[in-house]
Each structure stands twice: as C-alpha cells, then as structure tokens.
Image: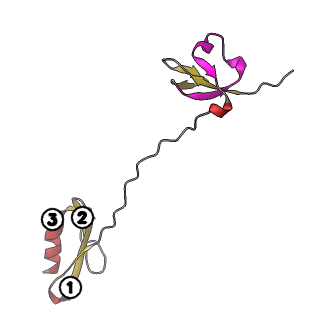
Amino acid sequence: MERQVKKLYKKIGGGIHRFEHKNYKTGDQFYAYPSQISETQKAFIIEIAESEKTKETPIARKKTPVIPVEPIVEEGENNETAYMEGKGAWFRVFEKDGTPAHEGSLRKKDAQELLEALLS
C-alpha cells in the first residue's frame, strides 16, 4: 500500500469552496490528499506544482505612532511650580511634587485655569 502525500491545490472560478471547515475563495491555495478531491470538485480546484506556490503575507495592523509629549511647566509666585501633561484635548495637572491636582482628565482650557489657580 502506497502512502498518500498531501498535494497543493488552488481554487479557481467563482464562489467559495468549503473544505475541512474553512472557506476558500478564488486564488486561495490549500493542501489536501488527492482522495479528498472529488471529480466534481476538479472543475474548480486545480493541482499546482510546489514551485508555483505563492507566499501568503499576513495582514499587518497599522501602528499608531508614539509622540512624546513635553509637560507644560509654569512657575508662579514664590518660585512654585506646577505642570500639566496631555495631548489633543485632554490634560492632567500635577503639583510640584508630582501628585495629581485632580481626578481624571480635563479639557485644555479647564486644565490651564486650574494650573493658574494653583500658581496664584
């Protein structure tokens, strides 16, 4: 008895071919034993040589760039310092020792008002 070897097949024609719990569209390649491909399936599935195998490239996710944000440091009367950090519309205000001056994030306008109030 000869041992069967899986061969490379390619889906051609329109529609979707369901094989081993997976859907294959036109141009998709997959391995199967020759006995798994019926005569009717041979109308839209062709055997291709291993050398013709196309490389599948995984879909790359777009990475959001990390933009370093410099804190806005202000000096008030008596050389007191406080700063605010954030980007876009949301900011946090910190006292000179690094403790947050409030809970959560504030809009830029509100954060600037709080910063001014801390320094006066």
What type is the residue that disc 3 sits on?
A: Asp
Pick the front one: 52 or 58: 52
Q: Which residue is drawn at 55% across and 28% down?
A: 28
Q: Name the residue under label 2.
A: 91
Q: What element carries label 2?
A: strand
Residue neighbourhood size for the residue with mark 1, other residues' Cα within 10 Å, grouped as few (<14), some (14–19), many (≥20): few
Q: Mark 3 points at which residue?
A: 110
Q: Is mark 1 on a helix, strand or loop?
A: loop
The answer to whether residue 103 is seen in the rendering is no
Relative to 52, residue 112 above or below: below
From mark 1 to mark 3, how far is it between C-alphas?
20 Å
Quadrant of the image occupied by residue 22 = top right
Q: Mark 1 points at which residue?
A: 80
Relative to 119, residue 43 above or below: above
Q: Position of residue 59 (x, y in %)?
A: 47, 41
What type is the residue that disc 1 sits on?
A: Glu
From mark 3 to mark 2, how far is it between C-alphas?
9 Å
What type is the residue that disc 2 sits on?
A: Phe
Q: Residue at x 48, y 18 (%)?
A: 15
- In primary-sequence order, the first of circles 1 and 3 is 1
Residue lying farthest to the bottom in this orientation: 78
For residue 40, the mark is none
Relative to 36, residue 103 above or below: below
Pick the front one: 31 or 103: 31
The question of residue 87 being in magenta is answered with: no
Q: Which residue is drawn at 23% across and 60% down?
A: 90
Please provide the residue range marked out in magenta: 27-47
* Quarter in which the C terminus is drawn: bottom left
